[in-house]
Image (cartoon, rainbow, N blue to C red):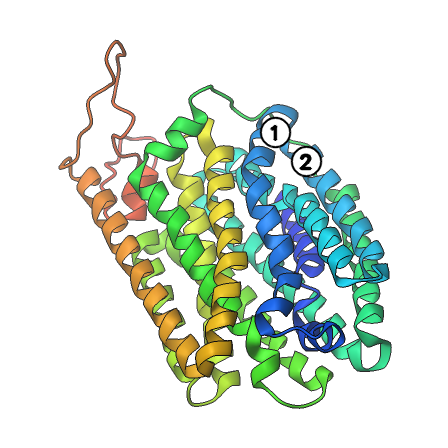
Amino acid sequence: MNRLTASIAASGFACFALLYTPQPVMPQIAAEYGLGPGGASLALSAATLALAVVVVPIAMLSERVGRRPVIVVSVLTAAVLGLVLPFAPNYDLFLVLRVLQGIAAAGVPAASMAYLADELDNRRLGAAMGAMIAGNSLGGMAGRLLSGMTADWLGWRGSVLLTGVFGLAAALVVVFFLPRAQGRPKRAPSGMKAALKDPVLLSLYALAVLLVGSFISFYNVAGFQLTGPSWLESLVFVFYAFGSTSAAFAGRLADRYGRGRVLLLCIGVLALGTLASLLWVPLGLAIVTAGFFASHATASGWVGARAPANARGHASGLYLCGFYVGSSIGGTSGSTAYGEWGWGGLVLVVLGWLALGAMLVQNSNGRVMRESTGEIFVRPSRGSSGSPSTMPTETERVSAGTSTTIANGSGPPS
C-alpha cells in the first residue's frame, strides 16, 4: 500500500469514527430524551443526511481547489465538532451540531474516491478503493466500540467526548502524511452532464442508496434487539473487521474477474446474512457486514473506473450522495419498520431492497457487456468529431469480464 492509499484510508478512518459514534449509545440517548427507535436514529441520520446534501457541491469544489485541501479541512473540522458535541445541553442543539459535523465530514468521502482515481491507474484502482473502504470500516468499528464500551462508566456524553479526542488524533495523522497531488484535477464544464447521462453510473448511484440503507438499518436497531450491558452489545461492531477484510479482498477480485460479477456475488452474501439474522442476530450481522463492505468497495471502484476523467469528482460525489441518502433516509425507514413490525418485518424490507439492487447490477453488467461487443453504439453529438464517448474502454471491458485486448508488441495481453 503506497503513502497516498494509506493516507486516504486514514482519513476515512478518522471521519467514520466520528460520524458513527452515537450509533451504539442510541438506547441511552432515547432513554434520556424519551425517544423511540426512529427518533433516536436521528442522532445518526441528521449527520448523514446533511453529508448527502453537500457532498456533490464539495466534490465539485475539490475539482477547483484540489483534493488534498478539501480532505484536510474536512477531517480537522469534523474532529473539532466531535469535541463540542457532548456538551450540547439539549437534543435539538445536539442534532444541529450533528448536522454541522456531517457537513464538515463530507469533504473526506467527496474527494477521496476522485483523488485515488486521479493519481492511480485503473489496474490498481480496485485494490486502492478496497483499502479505502477498509479504512472506513475500521474507523466506524473503532468509534462505535470506543463509545459503546465506555458508555456504562462515562455515560453517553463522556463516551462521545472520548471518541472525539480519538478522532482528532487520527485527523492529525492525515494532516501530516497525506501527500500532495501530482497534478491538478481535470476539469470541464460538461463534467456533471457526463456523470448524469451514463445509465450504468445512474444505476450505481441508486444501488448505493439500497445497499447502505439495508446495512445501516440493522445496526441502528441492533441495540434494541440485543439485551445486555452496553459494552457487551457494542461487541457486535467487531464485525466491522470482517468488512475491512472483505472490502480489500473484493477490490482485488473485481480487478481480476469483473466488477459486475463480483458485485452480484456480494449482494448474494448480503441477502444470506439477512436471512441468517432470523436464526441468530449476531451471525446475520457478521455476514451482512462482510457482504456490505465488499459490495461498497466494488461499486465505488466501478464508479471511479467508469466515469470519464473530467467527471470523476462529480460521479464520486453523486455516488456518495446516494450512499448517505441511504444511510439517513434508508436507515431511519428500516428503524421505523423494526418499530412497527419487529425484526422479521425489517428482514422482509431489506430483502426487497437487495432484490432491486441485484436487478440494477444485472442490467448494468449486461449493458457493459453489450458495449464491449459493439451491440451498443452511440454516435457523436452533432458538430463533434472523433470516437463516441460511450465506446467501451479496456476498463469497461474488464468490468464486464470480457476483456479482449490483443498484444501489440508493447506488453502481454491483459
Q: Is residue 298 left or right of 143 when viewed as pictured?
A: left
The label shown at residue 286 is none
Q: How many marks?
A: 2
Query: Which quadrant of the rendered structure holds the C terminus?
Result: top left
Extreme-left residue of the structure: 375
The answer to whether residue 217 is above or below residue 222 is above
User: Which residue type does callout 1 highlight?
Assistant: Leu
Give the residue at x 64% y 44%.
108
| Location of mark 1 (residue) | 61
The label shown at residue 70 is 2
Give the residue at x 17% y 35%.
376
State which quadrant residue 384 falls in.
Answer: top left
State yes or no: discs 1 and 2 in contact (Cβ < 8 Å). yes
Q: Is residue 25 left or right of 305 when viewed as pictured?
A: right
The answer to whether residue 334 is above or below residue 17 is below
The answer to whether residue 263 is above or below residue 186 is below
The tag earlier along the polypeptide, 1 or 2, is 1
Image coords of residue 199 (percent x, y) = 29, 40
Image coords of residue 168 (percent x, y) = 81, 53
Give the residue at x 71% y 83%.
230
Q: Secondary structure at mark 2?
A: helix
Q: Secondary structure at mark 1?
A: helix
Classify 10 Å Cα crowding around label 1: few (below 14), some (14-19), many (20 and above): some
Image coords of residue 330 (percent x, y) = 48, 61
Residue 401 visible? The answer is no
User: Which residue type does callout 2 highlight?
Assistant: Val
The residue lying toward the viewer, choosing from 331 and 246, is 331
Residue 397 visible? The answer is yes
The answer to whether residue 309 is above or below residue 335 is above
Q: Is residue 248 left or right of 90 when viewed as pictured?
A: left
Q: CA distance from mark 1 to mark 2?
A: 8 Å
